[in-house]
């Protein structure tokens, strides 16, 4: 058969590289680089774009192993020029944290959407964020000694909240609507508990930092947050990529997945764990940033299709793009609009962007929800 | 391929004293029926709406838990199989299937290889060969690059059957594969079943709504009435005027046609005329 070879090639090609995915990744990369350029160039300490970029490419940083050791493992920084210090120690880490947070939230949302076969699923809507947020507040206000293992605590809180949501929604299986409703219920209760903790905080500083946590903020993040989130991000991302074939089979529905020999409950549980880990890693460094986990997977899906190998890769680029761009707005928006140097939490910006996008989806798609 | 297939022998598939029902319902739908499926043949499960044919198939397919009884595959309890091992031996195609719209036909058929692949394994040559065979057998070569969302219902059904074929199982259970399809695609589906019957050792159990179709394509028929086996045997032994009156509640004549017994329905029977209902 003459066409035999062509066919084998088609099967062979694992559809990793696809035109729209490449375009999406390059576009996202451009946004991240552009946003990063804006972030390092503007701020209280003014420098020109050229000066800022010279600082970014300062060989004293790029080529010095000790500097990277200090960045990635902690410890003393060697002597650096003022500009380099501001760019590398204050402004760039914030961009890096935004990248990590965006990637984590997007991947987490993408996994939850496959596990629940529901386009509306996200760490935000399924209660994971509120559970993790509650545990973070509890730690900040009551058990301040445990702050060192905040990501772990956030992960436990997120996982617990997701289990509660799943249990509430379960009635001979779950449906998209039941899961979303259960998520709203759990989110409301945990939200109230979070508010309650504000009353137990006697220090206005604690309240302010608590508000920053529950809205989602990148203000004041530096290398410590990068060090905190990076390992979890790598693990969660790797697991998401490894699990992409399982996610694809889950999309075929429970009965098909079972008849293909998948242990659906086990796989769902494990993948939810990965999603909770990714969400928790982001929440631990930036608080609860809403909507990123919901809209990024959706945007990527509408561009590259539903294959999870591509979707996860797309999310790894588009999530950071959205986060970095939103953080530019959060950090410099007020300066541009009213000339004030105040910053708003980035969660406010993602909410302002995400809400209308959600509304647009609702209007455009009659049967939003089922994936 | 299991050892049985390598020996050239078809798999035996037996349901013993099956009690199957739905968790929400009090009474089981199928209460203590035994089913023997001739190895390597096509067996059709027929019966009117609500007679329990799909329920029985789901019980055989382990999609519904058995309240009692056992399903044996080559003499071994199906529940003793490891999940992937079972999926390599027993394939099931449900009545309703969902997939993302943007998945391509080839990718969907490729998912049929899931039970043959390890967690980290990519497609092997054997996997690709099985996918090619399935696509070829289902006659969907021209659709392979299309997105499933762009296909008609009939084309989609052929793709799902191809996925089940790619699983390369010894036993294949099909739940009403022709219902809701236009005549052309009904015949396409049944042509696949015919090929499996004539050219492979696969043991096929198919739930069919259409008695003529069942009589034409099956080697063996099992007629269900209200959750019990009413008759079992060759098409000409099962499809009789008495069965049509008792089980289906119609007055009809059965004649010998080109493809086995042929039914000419005449009148619905009412009330007391109908045997067990």
Image (cartoon, rainbow, N blue to C red):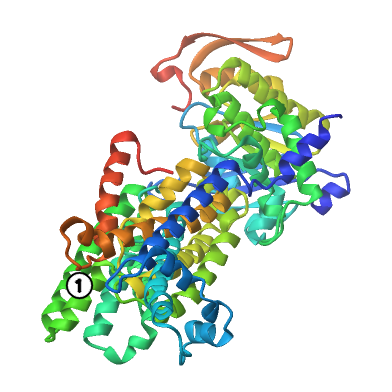
Front residue of this view, candidates A213 and A254 = A213
Q: Which residue is mark 1?
A: A211
Q: Is residue A303 left or right of residue B164?
A: left
- Tell me: residue A332, above or below residue A295: below
- Relative image position of residue A334 (x, y in whole percent): 20, 60
The structure residue drawn at horizontal position 22% and vertical position 57%, both measured from the top left corner, is A336
Q: How many marks?
A: 1
Asked whether residue B239 is in view, the answer is no
Asked whether residue B176 is in view, the answer is yes
- Tell me: residue A38, above or below residue B41: below
Query: Element under label 1?
Result: helix
- Relative image position of residue B129 (x, y in whole percent): 80, 42
Front residue of this view, candidates B203 and A248 = A248
- Tell me: residue B72, above or below residue A138: above
The structure residue drawn at horizontal position 33% and vertical position 86%, both measured from the top left corner, is A147
- The chain to which mark 1 is attached is A
| Quarter location, residue B243 | top right
The structure residue drawn at horizontal position 28% and vertical position 65%, both measured from the top left corner, is A331
């Amino acid at each position: 058969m003459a066409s035999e070879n062509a066919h084998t090639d088609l099967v062979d090609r694992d559809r990793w590289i696809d035109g729209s995915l490449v375009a999406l990744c390059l576009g996202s990369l451009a946004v991240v680089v552009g946003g990063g350029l804006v972030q390092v160039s503007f701020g209280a300490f003014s420098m020109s774009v050229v000066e800022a970029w010279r600082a970014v490419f300062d060989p004293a940083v790029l080529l010095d192993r000790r500097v990277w050791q200090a960045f990635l493992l902690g410890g003393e920084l060697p002597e650096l020029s003022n500009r380099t210090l501001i760019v590398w120690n204050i402004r760039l880490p914030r961009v890096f944290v935004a990248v990590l947070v965006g990637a984590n939230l997007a991947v987490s949302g993408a996994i939850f959407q496959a596990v629940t076969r529901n386009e509306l699923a996200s760490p935000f809507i399924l209660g994971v964020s509120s559970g993790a947020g509650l545990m973070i507040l509890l730690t900040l206000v009551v058990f301040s000694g445990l702050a060192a293992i905040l990501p772990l605590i956030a992960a436990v809180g997120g996982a617990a909240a997701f289990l509660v949501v799943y249990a509430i929604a379960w009635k001979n299986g779950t449906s998209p609507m039941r899961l979303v409703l259960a998520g709203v219920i759990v989110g409301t209760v945990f939200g109230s508990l979070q508010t309650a903790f504000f009353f137990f905080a006697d220090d206005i500083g604690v309240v302010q930092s608590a508000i920053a946590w529950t809205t989602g903020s990148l203000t004041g993040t530096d290398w410590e947050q990068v060090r905190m989130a990076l390992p979890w991000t790598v693990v969660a991302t790797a697991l998401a990529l490894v699990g992409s074939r399982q996610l694809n089979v889950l999309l075929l529905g429970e009965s098909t997945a079972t008849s293909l020999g998948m242990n659906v409950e086990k796989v769902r549980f494990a993948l939810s764990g990965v999603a909770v880990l990714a969400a928790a890693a982001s929440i631990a460094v930036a608080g609860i940033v809403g909507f990123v986990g919901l809209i990024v997977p959706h945007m990527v899906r509408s561009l590259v299709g539903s294959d999870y190998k591509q979707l996860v890769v797309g999310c790894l680029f588009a999530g950071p793009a959205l986060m970095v761009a939103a953080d530019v707005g959060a950090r410099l928006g007020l300066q541009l609009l009213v000339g004030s140097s105040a910053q708003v939490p980035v969660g406010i910006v993602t909410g302002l962007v995400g809400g209308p996008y959600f509304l647009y989806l609702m209007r455009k798609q009659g049967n939003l929800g089922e994936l | 391929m299991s050892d049985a297939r390598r020996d050239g022998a078809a798999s035996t598939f037996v349901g013993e004293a099956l009690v199957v029902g739905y968790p929400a319902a009090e009474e089981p739908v199928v209460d203590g029926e035994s089913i023997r499926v001739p190895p390597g043949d096509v067996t059709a499960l027929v019966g009117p709406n609500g007679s329990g044919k799909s329920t029985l198939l789901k019980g055989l397919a382990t999609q519904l838990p058995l309240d009692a009884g056992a399903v044996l595959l080559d003499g071994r309890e199906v529940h003793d199989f490891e999940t992937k091992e079972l999926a390599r031996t027993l394939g099931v195609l449900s009545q309703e299937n969902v997939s993302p719209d943007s998945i391509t036909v080839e990718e969907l058929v490729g998912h049929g290889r899931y039970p043959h692949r390890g967690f980290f394994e990519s497609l092997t040559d054997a996997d690709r060969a099985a996918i090619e065979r399935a696509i070829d057998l289902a006659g969907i070569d021209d659709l392979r690059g299309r997105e499933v969302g762009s296909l008609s219902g009939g084309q989609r059904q052929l793709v799902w059957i191809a996925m089940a074929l790619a699983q390369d199982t010894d036993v294949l259970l099909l739940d009403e594969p022709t219902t809701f399809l236009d005549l052309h695609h009904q015949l396409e589906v049944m042509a696949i079943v015919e090929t499996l019957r004539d050219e492979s050792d696969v043991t096929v159990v198919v739930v069919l709504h259409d008695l003529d179709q069942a009589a034409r394509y099956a080697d063996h028929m099992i007629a269900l009435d209200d959750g019990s086996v009413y008759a079992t045997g060759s098409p000409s032994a099962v499809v009789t005027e008495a069965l049509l009156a008792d089980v289906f509640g119609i007055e009809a004549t059965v004649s010998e046609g080109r493809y086995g017994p042929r039914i000419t329905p005449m009148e619905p029977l009412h009330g007391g005329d109908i045997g067990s209902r």
